[in-house]
Image (cartoon, rainbow, N blue to C red):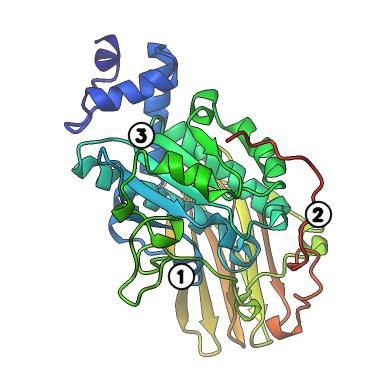
Amino acid sequence: MNFRRAVSDILQPKHDDKFLLRWLRARSWDVEAAEKMLRTNLEWRKEWDLDELVKSWQPPEPLASHYPSGLSGFDKEGYPIYIVPMGNLDMIGLLHTTSKQDMIRLTIKTLEEILLEAERNGVTQLVAIFDLENFNLRQFAWKPAVELVITLLQSYEANYPEILKVCYIINAPKLFALAYAVVKKFINEYTQSKIKIYKQESTKWQTHLFEHVSPDNLPKCYGGSMVDPDGDPRCPSLIKPGKIVSKALYKKNLTDEVLVNRDYVTTTVKKGKQLALDFFISDPGSLLQWDFRTEDHDIRFGVTYTDENGNVHKVINPSRTSANLVDVTGTITCKAPATYTVIFDNSYSKFRSKTLHYYVAVVENLSKLDIESSPEARMNQNEPNVIDEVVVH
């Protein structure tokens, strides 16, 4: 096979013909394009350190407990069934408490774990069910949420070709058509052909679903026979239902004023050097915020503080971040009095200087922030019916 010869220098023993065919199909059998896609993917896997990510990384709270998803079982051919109660996903709350990078990490880790389950059954694809009951368009029309969804879709299309057997989107309200019209621009036509969208008529989607899935592999709330030991038909022990993030946990005050008025600094961190930024903190509970990205290559990032006795403490252990792939954002609560040092470290690079765009600032005590008045604060009113249904099933 020409493709196998072209990529023989990067192949591993586990990369069988099925694996290679995924990349060829994704590039319409263009060997040169498939080679470029695969090589780029393997570099991407190194940058995200996927082996270590899957093995030891754990999502922080509240992301770990509030993100709705889980495996319910397998379809009749042995493909794993991944269920996402998408209508219960509190995007606004999670993005106020969790970095975009961690949400991307969780998505990658989840996909890798599902594919391992598929591999154990001798298959290479998955079945996805997105439940849109309680879907609120405001959660996904908010700019940071839109940017995250697009980033995830682009990453999926670039790095996980041909892993989707079929995707069922169920209980879709009318307004979902608006959201889908935006995101489908980032989904290739072949993937779109595998997406089946159903309205809030369970008899229709259950009929199609049970042609391929046995009832004992689906929770009772979806028409199956599975229940938790306590009789809960949603099976939350397997499929986390998701929930609203308490505003008491919010770490970020994402008001329009903060987002619009940020002054990003652009600088070059020379090869073998580092950039250290010091901030004196006098008010306990103040927040240190950062948002940065690099061009083309990663950079090591860390935070320390020096107490009044001159002792240096690590707050964030220095580690290489894929800031060339996604903006790295974060917030910590500071002790006082202390001097906090934000470090952008390029000392490990012998040949490449790094172009860095960063915003780092100290904001007042969280208790003084007016989160409630944020224009992104959730509203519980029912969504207006502004367009006709476009789903076809």
Q: Position of residue 194 (x, y in %)?
A: 47, 31
Residue 65, label in figure:
1
Instruction: Decide if residue 196 is on the left or right side of residue 128.
Output: right
Mark in the foreground, 1 or 2: 2
Q: Position of residue 147 (x, y in %)?
A: 65, 47
The first of marks 2 and 3 along the sequence is 3
Q: Can you say whether 311 is above or below 360 in the image?
A: below
Q: Can you say whether 287 is above or below 327 in the image?
A: below
List the residue tagged with mark 2.
384
- Separation of disc 2 and disc 3 at Cα? 45 Å
Residue, x 47% and y 38% (percent of image)? 156
- Residue neighbourhood size for the residue with mark 3, other residues' Cα within 10 Å, grouped as few (<14), some (14–19), many (≥20): some
Instruction: Decide if residue 373 is on the left or right side of residue 244.
Output: right
List the residue tagged with mark 3.
42
293 and 109: which is toward the camera: 109
> Disc 2 residue type?
Pro
Residue, x 65% and y 81% (percent of image)? 281
The first of marks 1 and 3 along the sequence is 3
- Residue neighbourhood size for the residue with mark 1, other residues' Cα within 10 Å, grouped as few (<14), some (14–19), many (≥20): some
Q: Can you say whether 191 is above or below 120 in the image?
A: above
Give the residue at the far top of this rendering: 2
Q: Secondary structure at mark 2?
A: loop
